[in-house]
Image (cartoon, rainbow, N blue to C red):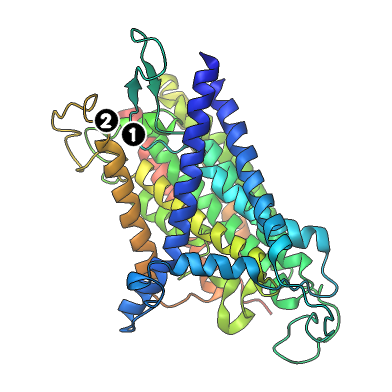
């Protein structure tokens, strides 16, 4: 019995890994295509139909490219930093549930169906796990920036660390309102608590703080100061080339997926299609594949939003970024927390 | 328990993927037989690199890190509190209000001292 469960887990894990890596590859394609359409260009359209094989060509090129390790670089850290970034980025996805799961009698006993949940690890402190793992991501960036032995990289890494810890605070505080209403740290329970109404509506202030902080946490424009091209060349990955550069890139896109999935879980109702009314009496036991479809569609919309924002807004200045984080978002998050807890106690 | 085993398997597979990719690219990539020293020189927009790369950076970054440690530890107390708030009721709410007031005073102090200000002289 245990072995069957572990077997199912291994299949699920392989599937998740495959889907995430493919998604990351095609996100880079989507980003280039969408940015091209926004700027009235064509974008990559030569490799395969509509350029759809572009990510594969990119991947092959990354693998075969010559690798340059700059002189004076701290070699062990220089090599490990991109791997560390990528690993921490991917394992954060382990606790995201995408549906209720289904029962199967495929393995052996017909009278005892095995329940297959649609997440890798159902941890009761799932939200804390995501927060903890995503905040580890800063180490990869700082190590990469420091070990490159380049001034641009070092400044990019330091900036990134300061930015990420500043916004992590408001990110953590903005989530507390959601936990207060759901009464659980388990992501499954948090989504299930949104059957009547999405948390977006009672927690709109929290959602605002959460979204701004997510953009800063994932180093996306308008907050991509760590890699601001006009000032720092490419920030912490200035000296990186070939596969190591690609791994930093993949880590960045994986972080985007995590942020989108987390936003969908916490505020946008997870697998519930509309802000009100749950499933409208549809038999979810029977149509178990509907929740994952809704969930993934929402994640795609969020990813599109990330890309859309990047190619629409200009970049902040660093002092504006810090001011926004500490003097606007942090007080707002505390205010949201006090109001929510007051409502819970008095109503 | 099974969840944590799954997590461990996931972690190992991801680690294997990351290390495997590095090893694979090491095996198949092009290796320059005679590397030009200019090629591996630190990138400074085409100029010869000046001085040490581990430069001094503004003290504000350290201050931000210190303030973060303070506030993050305090924020960690809020998670167990909010989960048991509905059971503990009014007393816990008032206690946390006092706690948040102290937190706010600390924030206000840092604000007044100019620690959150970036454009210092």
Above or below — where is A269 with respect to A211? above
Coordinates of residue A70 in the picture (x, y in percent): 79, 74
Most distant residue in the top direction:
A111
Q: Is residue A47 left or right of residue A192?
A: right
In-front residue for pair A2/A149: A2
What secondary structure is marked by label 1?
loop
Q: Which residue is mark 1?
A: A99
Task: Please give the chain letter of the residue carrying mark 2.
Answer: A
Classify residue A71 by image quadrant.
bottom right
Coordinates of residue A121 in the picture (x, y in percent): 50, 31
In-front residue for pair B81/A154: A154
Badge 1 density bin: few <14, some 14–19, many ≥20, Cα 10 Å: many
Marks 1/2 in contact by CB < 8 Å: the verdict is yes
Real-space CA distance between mark 1 and mark 2, rounded to the nearest whole angstrom: 8 Å
Which disc is residue A288 wearing? 2
Q: Is residue A113 left or right of residue A276?
A: right
Most distant residue in the bottom direction:
B47
Q: Is residue A277 left or right of residue A187?
A: left
The answer to whether residue A329 is seen in the rendering is no
Coordinates of residue A250 in the picture (x, y in percent): 55, 59
Query: Going from the N terminus, do you reach mark 1 or mark 2 first?
Result: 1
Classify residue A142 by image quadrant.
bottom right
Task: Please give the chain letter of the residue carrying mark 1.
Answer: A
Badge 2 density bin: few <14, some 14–19, many ≥20, Cα 10 Å: some
């Amino acid at each position: 019995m245990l072995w069957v469960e572990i077997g199912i887990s291994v299949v699920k894990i392989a599937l998740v890994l495959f889907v995430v890596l493919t998604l990351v590859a095609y996100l880079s394609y989507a980003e280039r295509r969408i940015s091209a359409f926004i700027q009235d260009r064509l974008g990559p359209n030569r490799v395969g139909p509509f350029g759809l094989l572009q990510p594969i060509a990119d991947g092959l090129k990354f693998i075969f490219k010559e690798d340059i390790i700059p002189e004076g670089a701290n070699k062990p850290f220089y090599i490990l930093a991109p791997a560390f970034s990528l690993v921490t980025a991917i394992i954060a996805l382990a606790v995201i549930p995408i549906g209720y799961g289904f029962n199967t009698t495929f393995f052996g006993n017909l009278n005892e169906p095995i329940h297959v949940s649609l997440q890798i690890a159902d941890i009761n402190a799932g939200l804390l796990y995501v927060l903890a793992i995503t905040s580890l991501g800063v180490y990869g960036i700082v190590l990469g920036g420091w070990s490159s032995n380049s001034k641009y990289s070092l400044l990019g890494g330091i900036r990134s660390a300061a930015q990420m810890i500043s916004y992590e605070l408001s990110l953590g505080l903005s989530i507390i309102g959601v936990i207060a209403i759901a009464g659980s740290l388990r992501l499954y329970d948090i989504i299930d608590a949104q059957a009547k109404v999405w948390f977006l509506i009672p927690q709109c202030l929290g959602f605002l703080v959460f979204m701004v902080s997510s953009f800063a946490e994932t180093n996306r424009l308008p907050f991509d100061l760590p890699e601001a091209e006009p000032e720092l060349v490419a920030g912490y990955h200035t000296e990186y080339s070939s596969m190591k550069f690609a791994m930093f890139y993949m880590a960045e896109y994986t972080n985007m997926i995590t942020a989108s999935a987390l936003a969908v879980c916490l505020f946008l109702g997870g697998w519930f299609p509309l802000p009100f009314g749950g499933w409208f009496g549809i038999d979810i036991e029977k149509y178990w594949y509907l929740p994952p479809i809704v969930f993934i569609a929402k994640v795609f919309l969020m990813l599109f939003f990330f890309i859309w924002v990047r190619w629409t807004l200009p970049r902040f200045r660093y002092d504006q970024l810090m001011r926004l984080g500490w003097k606007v978002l942090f007080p707002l998050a505390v205010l949201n927390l006090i109001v929510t807890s007051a409502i819970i106690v008095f109503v | 328990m099974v969840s944590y085993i799954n997590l461990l398997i996931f972690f190992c597979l991801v680690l294997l993927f990351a290390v495997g990719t590095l090893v694979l690219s090491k095996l198949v990539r092009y290796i320059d037989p005679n590397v030009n020293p200019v090629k591996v020189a630190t990138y400074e927009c085409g100029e010869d690199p000046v001085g040490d790369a581990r430069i001094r950076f503004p003290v504000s970054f350290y201050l931000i890190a210190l303030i973060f440690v303070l506030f993050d530890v305090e924020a960690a107390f809020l998670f167990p509190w909010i989960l048991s708030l509905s059971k503990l009721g009014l007393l816990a709410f008032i206690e946390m209000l006092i706690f948040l007031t102290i937190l706010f005073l600390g924030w206000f102090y840092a604000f007044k001292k100019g620690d959150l200000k970036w454009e210092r002289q």
